[in-house]
Image (cartoon, grey):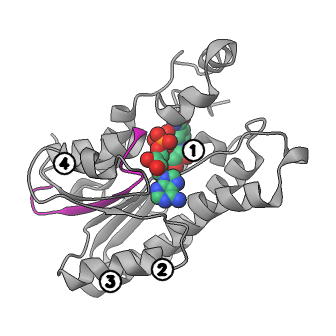
């Protein structure tokens, strides 16, 4: 059984590439109206290519102090209260912990954690008024296990899990579920920049199923958590990691 999102609006950040693009595509295929948010110059064309009608895009840098409030105000002005929020925009700076600069640390925290919180707060405020909603943030296996060279990334993704638990607790009685999805390495532009060649082969070998995940597989899990069927799941981190974190 697949869920029908025909009467639903989904705001997806990081929608112009990789996992966010796959999530937008799948939710649109199942009838959702997408609000695609990204800073990339691909945002408009990716939005235009989505199946179905009525999709819109907002091209913005989510680390701007006013971005989240401005997005919520823009949607509210048009009478649009998202049913689903997917925080997917993210970046990684990969270098040894001893070498990472203050600005590199801050840039990762700003996108992966701060933007996800302030957008959840802004859109969650609209959802609280209505009394329903689904918030899903893309964390990572790096939220749970150490990845060498990923100190800011691991910290940001672990913090996303803590943020999610508190939002889930505070908003459960208002009909809003809040969860994270934690993939292993996924075949996207972010991953191929880092996990190619011998390093990629070693990483694949360390994953019990022997391969990286596909964006569409992550999208399928997000669609489930966005559906009515998942109403009893909240405050959880759902791993989609081919068994990487089993042992
Ligand atoms: N690819 C992986 O291996 C992997 C694994 C686990 C988790 N993740 C997480 O999944 C999410 C998506 O990753 P991806 O692999 O699709 O990456 P990607 O680089 O393909 O896409 C990320 C998108 O986020 C957008 N973005 C980045 N910073 C932004 C900002 N400040 N404002 C607005 N948009 C911004 C980019 O423009 C881009 O379109 C990230 O949060 C990432 O940490 C990825």
Query: Circle 2 sits in a helix, a strand or a loop, which is it?
Result: helix
User: Which of the labelled discs sits on residue 170, or is there none?
Assistant: 2
Part of the protein shown in magenta = 5-18
Circle 4 packing at 10 Å, graded few (<14), some (14-19), many (20+), is: some
Contact (Cβ within 8 Å) of mark 1 with mark 4: no
Contact (Cβ within 8 Å) of mark 2 with mark 1: no
The answer to which quarter of the image holds residue 229 is bottom left
Is the CB atom of the residue marked by disc 4 within 8 angstroms of ligand 1's nearest atom? no
Q: Looking at the image, which is closer to me, 109 or 220? A: 109
Is 99 displayed left or right of 239 in the figure? right
Per the image, the residue denoted by label 4 is 48
Total marks shown come to 4
Of the numbered discs 4 and 3, the one sitting upstream in the chain is 4
Q: State which quarter of the image contains the C terminus.
A: top right
Using the numbered discs, state the Cα–Cα distance from disc 3 to disc 2 in whole angstroms: 23 Å
Using the numbered discs, state the Cα–Cα distance from disc 2 to disc 1 in whole angstroms: 23 Å
User: Which of the labelled discs sits on residue 80, or is there none?
Assistant: none
Of the numbered discs 2 and 1, the one sitting upstream in the chain is 1
């Amino acid at each position: 059984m697949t869920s029908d999102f025909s009467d639903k609006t989904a705001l997806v950040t990081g929608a112009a590439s990789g996992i966010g693009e796959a999530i937008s595509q799948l939710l649109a295929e199942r009838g959702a109206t997408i609000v695609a948010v990204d800073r990339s110059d691909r945002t408009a064309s990716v939005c235009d290519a989505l199946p179905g009608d009525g999709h819109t895009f907002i091209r913005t840098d989510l680390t701007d102090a006013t971005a989240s409030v401005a997005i919520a105000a823009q949607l509210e002005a048009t009478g649009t209260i998202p049913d689903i929020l997917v925080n997917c925009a993210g970046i990684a700076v990969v270098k040894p912990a001893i070498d990472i600069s203050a600005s590199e640390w801050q840039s990762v925290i700003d996108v992966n954690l701060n933007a996800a919180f302030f957008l959840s707060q802004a859109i969650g405020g609209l959802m609280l008024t209505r009394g329903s909603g689904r918030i899903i943030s893309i964390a990572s296996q790096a939220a749970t296990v150490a990845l060498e060279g990923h100190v800011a990334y691991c910290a940001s993704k672990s913090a996303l899990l803590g943020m999610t638990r508190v939002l889930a607790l505070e908003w459960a009685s208002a009909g809003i579920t809040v969860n994270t999805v934690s993939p292993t390495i996924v075949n996207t532009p972010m991953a191929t920049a880092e996990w190619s060649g011998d390093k990629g082969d070693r990483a694949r070998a360390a994953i019990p199923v022997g391969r990286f995940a596909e964006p569409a597989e992550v999208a399928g899990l997000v669609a489930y958590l966005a559906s009515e069927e998942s109403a009893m799941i909240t405050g959880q981190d759902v791993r989609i990691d081919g068994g990487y974190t089993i042992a």
